[in-house]
Image (cartoon, rainbow, N blue to C red):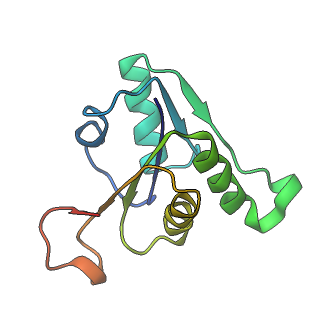
Amino acid sequence: MKVAVVGSRNLNINIAEYLDCEVVTELVSGGARGIDSLAEEYARRKGIPRKIFYPDYDAYGRIAPLMRNREIVAYADLVIALWDGCSRGTKNAIDHARQLKKPLKIFIFPGNDAHSLFSEPIVM
């Protein structure tokens, strides 16, 4: 299954906890720091092929990262969102996955103002 991993750049988590239970035949990423980099490293260690969508600033200018998110979601069979509850880019990918009715797993992590009362990720 082509699994897209999208997420906030400020999270540093054990990504294997969220990917080991999936049948990943190709990992789809956006090539950014944070969750994208962690997912790409996970795929390298496991020998899983990677498809990386980089933002095309020449074609889209400032909205290139958002257009990249649309491409990632459209390409994937499953979207896993690892979100800090604040990142607009991750929220954009979540919204697009819902719009396309893609299978979607959302994990919201504590430590920001919206979810600081929780000690474990919130699963949606």
Q: Where in the figure is residue 100, as x and y percent of width and height?
A: 58, 57
Lateral position of residue 8 relative to residue 57, left or right: left
Viewer-side residue, 78 vs 39: 78
Q: Tell me if residue 72 comes above or below residue 119 in the rendering.
A: above
Viewer-side residue, 60 vs 79: 79
Q: Tell me if residue 73 comes above or below residue 114 in the rendering.
A: above
User: Furthest residue to the right?
Assistant: 59
Viewer-side residue, 117 vs 124: 124
Residue drawn 46% across the image and 23% down it: 25
Viewer-side residue, 82 vs 74: 74
Residue drawn 29% across the image and 83% down it: 113
User: Furthest residue to the bottom?
Assistant: 113
Lateral position of residue 9 relative to residue 31, left or right: left
Residue drawn 29% across the image and 82% down it: 114
Q: How many marks?
A: 0
Q: Where in the figure is residue 13, as x and y percent of width and height?
A: 28, 49
User: Furthest residue to the top?
Assistant: 47
Lateral position of residue 95 relative to residue 107, left or right: right
Q: Where in the figure is residue 36, as x and y percent of width and height?
A: 48, 45
Q: Quadrant of the C terminus?
A: bottom left
Find residue 8 and report its image quarter: bottom left
Q: Where in the figure is residue 75, as x and y percent of width and height?
A: 62, 40
Find residue 115 and report its image quarter: bottom left
Lateral position of residue 18 relative to residue 103, left or right: left
Residue drawn 81% across the image and 55% down it: 57
